[in-house]
Amino acid sequence: MPSSNRPRWIDLRHDLPGIADLLSTAFAERLDEDGHAALRQLRRIARSRSAQRAYAAREIPGAPLYGFVWEADGRIVGNVSLIPLQAKPKQYLIVNVAVHPAYRRQGIAAALMQATLRHARQRGAQAVWLQVETWNKGAIALYHRLGFTDRDVVTLWKAQPDAQATAPTLPGIRVHSRLTRRREWPQVKAWLQTIYPAERAWHRPLASWRGLAPGWRGFAWRLLHPLSFRMWVATRSKRLLGTAAWLPTGGSPTDAFLLAAPPDLPPAEVAALLAPLRRHAPRPLRGELPQGFLAEGLSAAGFEAKRHLLWMKWAPLIES
């Protein structure tokens, strides 16, 4: 099929319906509830001239509305979206790398990615990130050729709410809904910093761990940054075993969860810690954890491993 020969910047006035159609086709078998919600939001913005003007006037962090498309035969057949991140130094996240099935293996994805990285470099980006499923060897090879490096692999876990979710009865184990205590916080913070890398703090459902902290520092942070969450703390004979937090996410069909625990916490204790989240959360829960981390316990708690994702990072070459 004939195709155009260059990527072009997304035109918010005209391209959004075509991008939504392309993503629906290219990712038909992989779209989850969050993906469908994102497409609905894209189509809503396509109908709002005022929203288009606002997004076009400046880069708005978190908005997946910038990037490049490829046209052929009167329709959009390729797309790469570039999300500005709320991070310093300047960084971007690439999402929605898609080519229509009828136009694949023509170099369209590579050309779109090259244009996207040139734009990021021109805008002063110090890093560009993306996620790719670990089975997608062709995409991973392309990203390596473009200069991306592997960072780490995470598993996306999901669970449905269940008011009747039960946990195993374990002698001496107590799970309470409360904040951590001052003496517990250093250990909880250390677990969180190990599980959720600092270099991707912008990807966490909570920007600062101070939001979970006990005492006046945590209280002051929550006063300045309105935050809704509920935490559960598991102990045995007053010894801290782990914590879990439920964080509602406005505008999304799923809520986030955070888990802070040692990597050798027994599966039954993981299940006891997580059961209250499923009983309390009104919507499905989702969270990313390092691949293999407490996997048996998460499964025992009713969570499902949905995707295994490789985080990759690109940084511009510094000319000497």
Image (spheres, rainbow, N blue to C red):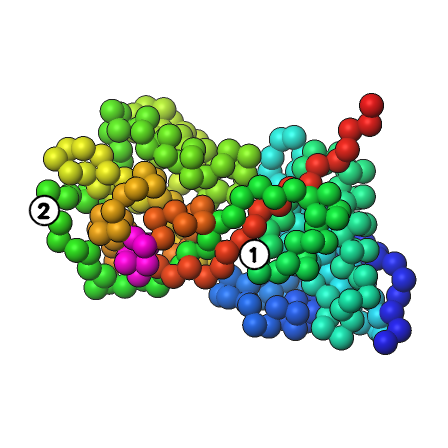
C-alpha distance separating marks 2 and 1: 40 Å
The disc labelled 1 sits on which kind of residue?
Thr
Q: Is residue 300 magenta?
A: yes
Label 2, on which residue?
171
Q: Nearer the viewer, residue 53 or 297?
A: 297
For the point 49% across and 36% down, the residue is 197
For the point 28% across and 57% down, the residue is 301
Q: Percent from the top left, x then y, of residue 225?
A: 44, 35
Q: Is residue 273 magenta?
A: no
* First in residue order: circle 2 vs circle 1: 1
Q: Is residue 59 visible from the viewing direction of this image?
A: no
Q: Secondary structure at mark 2?
A: loop
- Left or right: 9 as drawn, with respect to 234: right
In this picture, which residue range is highlighted in magenta? 296-302
Q: Which label number is shown at residue 20?
A: none
Q: Main secondary structure of the magenta part?
A: helix
- Left or right: 178 as drawn, with respect to 84: left
Q: Secondary structure at mark 1?
A: loop
| Quarter placement of the C terminus | top right
For the point 80% across and 49% down, the residue is 114
Label 1, on which residue?
134
Q: Label 2: how many residues lie within 10 Å, few (<14), some (14-19) or many (20+)?
A: few
The disc labelled 2 sits on which kind of residue?
Pro
For the point 60% across and 35% down, the residue is 87
Residue 119, located in which quarter of the rendered image?
top right
| Quarter placement of the N terminus | bottom right
- Whether residue 264 is situated above or below residue 34 in the rendered picture: above
Q: Percent from the top left, x then y, of residue 14?
A: 78, 64
Q: Percent from the top left, x then y, of residue 245?
A: 33, 45
